[in-house]
Each structure stands twice: as C-alpha cells, then as structure tokens.
Amino acid sequence: MIIPTLTEAEARDLRALAGHMIPASAAYKVPGADDDLILADIVKSLERDFDDARTALAHLAKLSGGTFAGLAPARQAEVAAIFKAEGGAPLHALNRVVLLCYYRDDRVMRALGQEPRSPFPRGHDVEQGDWSLLDPVKTRAPIWRRVS
C-alpha cells in the first residue's frame, strides 16, 4: 500500500496554518499546533482526510498567491481569516485532525489538568449536569424510519 505524503511546500503551509489555528501559550505553558511532535502526529493522522487536507492546502496556497508559510505573519493572519470563511468541508476536515492531535498531546492534557492517559478502563469523573435539558429530545417524535 502506498502512503501518500505532503509536499515540502504543503507541509510548511500546514505548519504555519496550524500555528495560527492554535498558537503556543507561555501563560498556559502549552505548545502550539505547529509544534514538531504535534505536527508529526497531524501529518500521520490525515489518513482518510488526506485528499481534503491537500485540497484545503491548495486553496490556502491560491489565496496566498504562492505559499502561505512565505508570507509575513500579519499577512498570514489576513489570509487565514479569508481561508476560514472560504475553506468549506476540506478545511473542516483538516481542522478536525489538527484539534484531535493537539488535544491528545500529553503536554496539553497536563496543562488542562488531565492525566495524559486513555480514558478507559478507569474513565474520567464528569460533573453531573441538568438532565432535564434532554426532555425535549426524549419527547420528540422519532426522526428515523422503522424497518419491517
């Protein structure tokens, strides 16, 4: 099986875009999504979203007039704002992968006060909320079709 890879220009643009999506924070002591470890996880995790990611990065390059990574930071922010409005489904797919990989990074989990581990088998304590908020869903008519 051939594993598709990003071009060097696409990888640089992805790094720059990820840094705009989730910048590093010294106040919270967390890396940005453009961190080497997180970016490697993002690229590795593209899998089924690879084609959407390439489509999104091609659109970003077009908006940039070349390469997004080559722009000055202020211009990157302007282009990123336009891209956010125009990116559509390919950008949503890329955004999902970036967020998934960012929030499974051990450093980020520790900064959020979470133990960096799988939620199972021990689970996580979740504060109980107002279950009455589900009443409209419970009383709603079925939204599916019964099968005979």
Image (cartoon, rainbow, N blue to C red):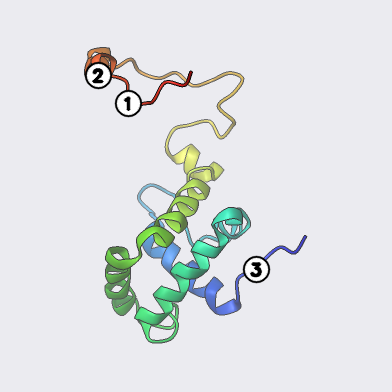
**Are there few (<14), some (14-19), or many (20+) residues within 10 Å of tag 1?**
few
The amino acid type found where label 2 is placed reads Arg
The amino acid type found where label 1 is placed reads Ile
Q: Secondary structure at mark 2?
A: loop
Closer to the chain start, of discs 3 and 2, is: 3
**Are there few (<14), some (14-19), or many (20+) residues within 10 Å of tag 2?**
few
* Whether residue 95 is situated above or below residue 118 in the rendered picture: below
**Residue 129 percent across, percent down from the top left:** 29, 17
> Front-most of 16 and 47?
47
- Label 1 and label 3: CA atoms lie apart by 41 Å
**Residue 61 percent across, percent down from the top left:** 43, 79
User: Residue shown at 39%/54% (left/top)?
Assistant: 26
> Front-most of 24 and 128?
128
Closer to the chain start, of discs 1 and 3, is: 3
* Whether residue 38 is situated above or below residue 123 in the rendered picture: below
**Are there few (<14), some (14-19), or many (20+) residues within 10 Å of tag 3?**
some
> Front-most of 68 and 132?
132
Residue 71 position by quadrant? bottom left
Q: Identify the disc placed on residue 143.
A: 1
Residue picked out by circle 2: 140
Q: Identify the disc placed on residue 5.
A: 3
Q: Secondary structure at mark 3?
A: loop
Q: Secondary structure at mark 1?
A: loop
For residue 86, side relative to residue 126 (left or right) = left
- The reply to whether callout 2 and callout 1 are in contact (CB within 8 Å) is yes
The amino acid type found where label 3 is placed reads Thr
